[in-house]
Image (tube, coloured by chain):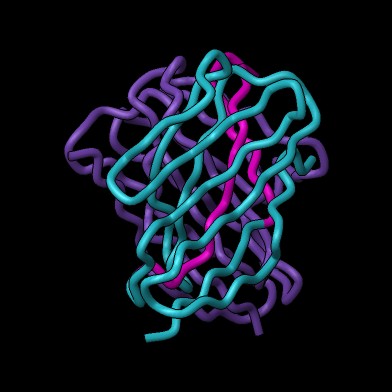
Amino acid sequence: GAVVSQHPSRVICKSGTSVKIECRSLDFQATTMFWYRQFPKQSLMLMATSNEGSKATYEQGVEKDKFLINHASLTLSTLTVTSAHPEDSSFYICSAGYSTAEETQYFGPGTRLLVL
Amino acid sequence: SQQGEEDPQALSIQEGENATMNCSYKTSINNLQWYRQNSGRGLVHLILIRSNEREKHSGRLRVTLDTSKKSSSLLITASRAADTASYFCATGSSGAGSYQLTFGKGTKLSVIP
């Protein structure tokens, strides 16, 4: 149980375009979903926390207008990278928890974004 | 900001040997978790140890926690080639109305067959 999927697994786009990444909890309802960014050989950096039906909470330094997060249902959250630039190239990983108090997070397989 | 700091950054051992990774953190915690990440993949939760626990076992994994030193260690016994991965510690805290994890930089473990 507790499977999280992400789509697409990898995407290549031109600079200036927008890219949407989906995160789905397949066999449970996720009240809370998290979006992380990971640069090569580095750790995961939390970008934002989203609770179903409410606005996402962004970490300091993360532009909310650039990284649009929508958590419209208990099984789906989306991250849209708007007007992507080469410096946005990274590995984006989502995770989900059963509840706001859930201590363990279940991670998706990640999405590799390359902006040319 | 980074909370956990793993040590060593990279570790290479022979199959069958034990692997020990350490993690230090700075603030008070409710729990500390260890995750594993295969190259280019998502993370898999390995084990959670609470602040009032000192040691925990799960299969070939043994985790210790010393809250006075703000440190934890992950021991993998009788390592296998399939254990090759990056291992991250993460500390949990409440924030933004939900439970958040802060990850360390990770230890890259290579187990040589």
Q: Nearer the viewer, residue A106 or A115?
A: A106
Look at the picture and state if A23 lies above or below B100: below
Q: Residue B113: which quarter of the image?
A: bottom left
Q: Nearer the viewer, residue B48 or A69?
A: B48
Q: State which chain is coloured purple.
A: A
Q: Residue B94: which quarter of the image?
A: top right
Q: What x and y, as percent, mark residue A37?
A: 62, 55
Q: What x and y, as percent, mark residue A42?
A: 69, 63
Q: Nearer the viewer, residue A23 or B41?
A: B41
Residue B96 in magenta stretch: yes
Label the magenta part by its dominant secondary structure.
strand
Question: Who's the residue at 44% across and 84% down the image?
Answer: B112
Question: Who's the residue at 24% across and 39% down the image?
Answer: A2
Q: State which chain is coloured cyan.
A: B
Q: What x and y, as percent, mark residue A43?
A: 66, 56
Question: Who's the residue at 47% across and 24% down the image?
Answer: A51
Which portion, as a residue range, is magenta?
A: B83-105
In this rendering, would B55 be left or right of A57?
left
